[in-house]
Amino acid sequence: MRAFQYGKLFEPSSGLRIVERKARRCLAYCRHKLGLKKTPLPIPIEDWIERALDIRFGIEDLSHLGPQVLGAAFIKDREILISDKALQNEGRFRFTCAHELGHFVLHAKVADAFQETDEPGFASSQRIERNADRFAAAFLMPIPHLERELVRIAEDAKLDPQWCLSELMMPTQKSEDLWKALVVPEVCRRFGVSRIAALIRARGLRLTTDHQRPLLPARFYYAWASPSAISVFDRGSPPDERTGRGARNE
């Protein structure tokens, strides 16, 4: 069996390296502040926001900010509020928390407050919202941990990890089946994230030895990440597993 060096297989695409670095530093700071030698999975994001980063955190009705708002970050007040609507889906809730944290880390000098109503993934037209999504995905799914779990997912399914990882990067029917039936559901379960979060993360990673090869083929991402397509991707899933994003839109 090949010995994998976790953290060496994939790296962020060139345009995402600054966001990746800031997410990694924030994660390391949280571990240091809390005296943790290892990163727990799923990462207890709402607890770390308060205990490690000294940001007030609350869950309440945010309908006064707009009917579609699921999260808000108030930079000057050092407060993150999450709509009680987000509690309907654990993955959505956690990604929303990490997305709002992303505004604190990435955009503290851009504006005093952020409230999100955009659609998830590539449908978000604003660059700051896309970067907050990417920060959230990087924070909740660190590269070494994601690589390790991908190998374990393959092994648990009695598949050769090297073959499985290679196949996942190919735009084939077999790859599509692996992503939809095995990899995305397992990544969501192990990291406690929504499916759109898993797609955003996989799309932003490249093979270290070949930067032209993303972990998730572009055809799959654009077929599955739009608001209309995600319901097709989730068809047959229990309602509480359906994705939405930290996304904030119902």
Image (tube, rainbow, N blue to C red):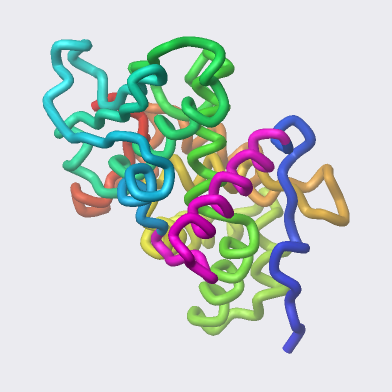
Locate residue 76: give its quadrant. top left
Q: Residue furthest right?
A: 209
Is the residue 225 above or below the residue 237 in the image?
above
Q: Nearer the viewer, residue 142 or 1?
A: 142
Side of 132 where 216 appears, left or right: right
Residue 142 lies in magenta, yes or no?
no
Side of 25 where 101 appears, left or right: left
Q: Image quadrant for the C terminus?
A: top left
- Residue 213: x percent and y percent? 78, 47
Residue at screen point 73% across, 38% down: 17
Side of 196 where 12 appears, left or right: right
Locate residue 20: give its quadrant. top right
Locate residue 112: give its quadrant. top left
Asked if one can make out residue 181 in the rendered structure from this viewpoint, the answer is no
- Residue 42: x percent and y percent? 39, 61
Q: Nearer the viewer, residue 78 or 225?
A: 78
Magenta segment: 18-42
Is the residue 117 above or below the residue 86 in the image?
above
- Residue 67: x percent and y percent? 18, 14
Q: Determine the main secondary structure of the stretch shown in magenta.
A: helix
